[in-house]
Amino acid sequence: MAEQHNRFNDFMRGLTEASSQPVQPLPETVPFDKPAAQLGKELYFAPQLSANGTVSCATCHIIQQGGDDNRPVSIGIHGRKGELNAPTVLNSGFNLAQFWDGRAATLEEQALHPLVTPHEMGNQSVQVVADRLNADSKWRQKFIQTFGEPASPQAIAYAIAEYERTLITPGSRFDRYLLGDHDALTPQERRGWKLFQSYGCIGCHQGINLGGSMFQKAGIYHPLGVRESRWLGRYNVTHREEDRHVFKVPTLRNVAETAPYFHDGSVPTLEKAVTLMIEAQLGKQPRAQVVADITAFLKTLSAPPKDLLHGH
Amino acid sequence: MDTDSRFPKRIDAFMHRYGLWLITGLGIILTVAWLGLRPSLLQYAPALTAHVNSLRQDLTALEVERSRLERFNLVRPDKVQWLARDMRLHIRQFQEKTRQAGLVDVSQTLHALQARLQHLLHTFDGALREHAIVVDSYNTLPVLGESCELDLRKGASPPATLHPHDIYTALLLLPLRRALTEQEIQAVTTSVNRARTILPSDSQACGRFIEHARTFIRHFARLHQQLNRLNLDSARQLISRLDTQLQHHIAVAQQRQRTLSVTLAGLGGVMALLIFIMMALLKRTVTTLRQQKQELTRTSRLYHALSDINEIIVTEKNERTLLQRALEILVNDLQIPGGVVTCCPDANNILTTVAVHTQSQEARQLLEQFKFDISPGTGNATATMLPAWESQDIQIFRDLNTHPRFARWHSLLRRFSIRHVITLPLVDSDGNSRYLITLYMSTDEYAGTATLQLLREVREDLELALHRLHLLQKERQQAALLRLAEVAFNAHEGIVIANEEGRIERANDTLLQWCGLDPEHMADQTLSALFVEQSVIQRVMQELPHSGYWQGELSLRHVDGTPLPTLTTLTWVPPSQETDRTGHFIAHCLNLSRQRQLEHELRSIQQRDPVTGLPNHKALIDQLSTIMEQIMPHGECGIISIINIRGFKSINTALGHQGGDTLLRQLAERLRERPAFPHLTARSSNDEFLLVPIHFFSSPDAARQWWERKYAELLGTLSEPYDINGQPVQVEYYASAMLFDHDLPAERIVDEIETGIQLARQHGQGVTQLYFHTPDQTSDSRQGQDITLRHQLEQALERGELVLFHQPVHNTLERRFTLTEALIRWRRDGKLVPPGAFIPVLERYPQLMTRVGRWVLRQGIADAARLNRTLSHPVSVSVNLSAVQFNDTDLIAILKETLTRHKLPPAQLTLEITESALMADLGRTRALLDALRELGVHVAIDDFGTGYASLQYLQLFQPDKLKLDKSFIDPIDPQDRRTLAIPEATVAMAHALGAKVVAEGVETAEQAAALSAIGCELLQGYHFARPMPLDALLDFLKQSETQ
């Protein structure tokens, strides 16, 4: 399993190393372990993963809706609300870390967190989930077929992560533009792309995912979103003073589909989010035209997820 | 013998000795090999070096990223991330690969590197963050600065000292300056802060400029700090250190591997050598064992053969059969093709074939017909048979089948695969070759010295056996002589010989006469039919083949039905295979009719009271004891009563003896007839009568009551007047009664009741009423007498009152006295006590008898020694040995010790044992006689002819002397040859047995002459001398010598 992970990392490195540009298009495909991904897909949609069989991964990370649930905070098991806005699952394999605060280095790590978080799937431990799956001969059989052994926390995590890595959205108009199709973007969108670069947005929102590659302080010139103690971001992980209110720079891919915005889901529209970002992070008062252009550009980052499992 | 089981045992021992070393060695090799084959550092060395190189490259790439940050170039945070990730990956893989090697310093360095990397990444992270902001502000500053400048120009006069232009120029120049210090940045910060106070606050443009400038300078300071902290040198040093350590470990590992290889090769070589040596040793052991096994099998066969032959030697009685079977054993046990026994070369030197045994039938026929010619030079049996016959030594001829001399036999020899031939000559006791045993061998197995050794033993054994058979034949001739003597001896015995079925085959004249039978009628008769007690004899005959001997009193039946009491001895002669004789019964019958008649008369005289015809005192004792033994139940008691006629003496005087006797007779009749219960009656003494009811009681009270009643009736009867010659006479009585049980013998009971009546009379009791006597347990007159005598004898022994008298025995051949018989005498108060008065008492006290017997032996030996010291010719002494002394376990030891002490040759001592003593306990007698014979002491059978000693036992005991009883000597009449028959037969028989005869009680010169004439060499009796003390004997012998 670790080998597969290395393979994916090497593949990603290859994508970014080769490019001198700060942003890269999404690849058309990724290397993955098909049987594991297949099982991972079934697990992703399986409500059996939650304590009372009502919540699956797909409950909060709806693949056809930009990979999240379009709620400010997710509603987990027994209708409990989450604390932060659900990040998109799409293209999450290209993120340097998972969660807003980056507490999970890999998708495998991330996949297990919701299983045992009380307000998400509410299980006592991952082993309980594994035992539950093993108790069901159908699931047990599937695991044995895939891994040659019954379900275990490692196997569950690997299968789900493997599936999630296949959730990519290549072929957006911006990607086509990057690959040389100059007409893929309208003039306004091209203007937006230029502004995105000259305004310095690209200083943080860069790489394949236009984000997800660094941690940055939310609100340099002005505070951004609701500053509550529970939303201290990376500080919760590192406990360094300087990491207060530092969050993972979120990806902008499919950003138009993943409203509401910011870690607290406090901003309902993209225009408003762009305006707030320029004010807080860049110390500028953007003109309406600028916001409109950048927003137009951001919308070109959307593409439907590609079904790698069936396309192969 | 199972030799196979020895084999694994040897291996076992071997493994015991070396196995531990072997296993330890293997263990060491395996351990070392495992250590050597463990995933080695060397295996990963190229990969590890590659990791280090990758780490270096990544670090260089990071350096590039750092310099980009410094120069405000566009940086790719994701690239830093990938680099970091890559480095972490390399470190982790490096760790995984070196974990097993347990390299402490490397893992420390790796940890340090990891920590360093963590720190670097964190710093990079911060730097990137600052960088994004700084770059952003940097781009904005000129625009905002110009706007502020414009505002200042539009507004009030600006302070001449400060222009936003100067500020942002200073700010923009900051990243371009090399070796920027904190102070310089601080100075710029101070100027920006100062500008904030100076610049007009109403200008929005200036406000934003200052805000951006401050943000810029703040974040630039931070970026500068981060970059300063972003020191990659330490990481590079760590990587270099890692590289050095790795190279060092690789070098060490290589060195170790080389050492290991050398060690392994060395150890392996040593082990291989050890194993090789072990295998060699094992092989040698196996070979030795195999040889030993073969040797053992061979030896085992040889000894098996020897043992088998010894077995048949014991059982076989016939020479030829013995040889045939010995040959069979040799051929079969040694597993050789065959063998032949030959003997007696005829005039043409052709040997007679006695026995042949071969494995194949064909070879057998050939050997049987083969003429073994031992003619020197020309004979066909000159290989071994001739030399063996002549040298009388075992001869071996090896490789007969290839020897040119026997070329014409080669094909035949090959056909029966014969290679060697061995011939054993059997030599008789006279030193002549008798037989040749020739064995043909097909293998070398039995051609060695071990076989020769065995064959030598076989030969010796067979020779001994042949010698023994020869002796046996001689013995048989002797037995024939014995049988002759038997016929003569049987003059007054009836003898019948019957076959196995009990049918009579022969009978002597005496028996025919006794039974009134003709010899012709005998054929149809069975042995049992001769006897009255047919069932007894039939039963005896059935058991006889097992017991061999039976003796008892049986009556022969005369044809007219008259029984003839005899003492019959039945002997079983088992069948003999040798002579094809079936088993026989031999009955010897001794006529007891005369003896019986005398006994009967005697008994009659002894037991009846002649006056009354009633049993007397003694008879009553006999009857009473019979009743007590056979009728009276144990645990019950009986009554004995005594009746005494009061004043019989006066009655007798009054009526006269005749009248007294009449009275007694009438009284006896009344006592016998009147009581209405079974009883015994006896006349105890003159006027005393005894009465014992044959009626017994479980309790004394019941007995008393019963007797009181009966006694009253009896008294009534007895009190009736008697008619003595027409004159009525009334008599009065004393009476006494006593209860008795089995505790007292009959004798004592009668004694007691007689004592009882004395007491009754003395005390005047029992006049009319019954007096019950209580016996006094201690009083027993005869026993008391015995005890007194015993005590006196004891004293006599101690005081030396016992002496030995000697009666010389005349030797008719040497015409002088060569033997004396020592006889015990008791000189009591100067007077000699007759032997009959004390010897029976001695016999009753075995302990005393034993002591006296020992004294007699010692004294006899001492006397003999004295005789031999004093006299010029040897004189033997004969001492009587009592039957009691047979039980004296120290007897032999005492004999030995005394003989040694007196230096008397054992042959000078003869021990006389009576026939009856001999027969009492055959086993013990046999053992004693064997011991005596071993000691060299002579044995004589005393009173020969009086007891029932059978001839068979004479042969068994083989005495040195027979003492013919006086009863056979007395009737000797030189005129009547028949009177000499028994002495003559005895002498013949004794001589046949190698014994001498001593005639006892020779009283006349005629007897002496007659006995001398029939060859009786030793004569003893008053005719020659009476028993005399030793001194007298010495004088007597000296005197007789001079005559």
Image: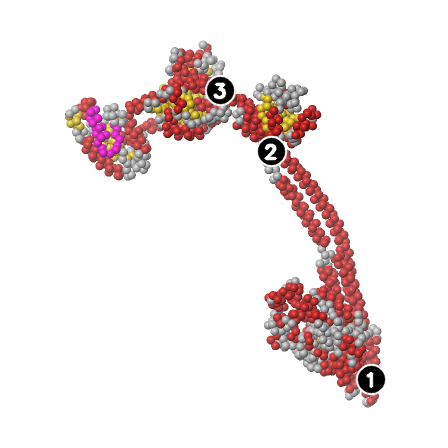
Quadrant of the rendered structure where residue A187 is?
Answer: bottom right
Indicate the position of residue B219 as horizontal and vertical percent values. Answer: 77, 77
Are the residues flagged by discs 3 and 2 from a single subunit?
yes
Indicate the position of residue B902 as horizontal and vertical percent values. Answer: 49, 21
Magenta region: which residues?
Answer: B661-684
Q: Is residue B522 magenta?
A: no
Q: Amino acid at mark 1?
A: Glu
Indicate the position of residue B904 as horizontal and vertical percent values. Answer: 49, 20
Q: Is residue B795 above or below residue B146?
A: above
Q: Amino acid at mark 2?
A: Ser
Q: Which residue is mark 3?
A: B478
Q: Which residue is mark 1?
A: B146
Nearest to the observer: residue B162 or residue A246 = A246
Answer whether labels 3 and 1 touch (C-beta < 8 Å): no
Density class for disc 1 (Cα within 10 Å; few <14, some 14-19, many ≥20) is: some
* Chain name for mark 2: B
Label 1's element? helix
Asked if residue B574 lies left or right of residue A252, the reply is: left
Q: Which residue is mark 2?
A: B300
Density class for disc 2 (Cα within 10 Å; few <14, some 14-19, many ≥20) is: some
* Chain name for mark 1: B
Q: In whole angstroms, how far apart are the C-alphas of marks 3 and 1?
A: 172 Å
Density class for disc 3 (Cα within 10 Å; few <14, some 14-19, many ≥20) is: some
Q: In whole angstroms, how far apart are the C-alphas of marks 3 and 2?
A: 42 Å
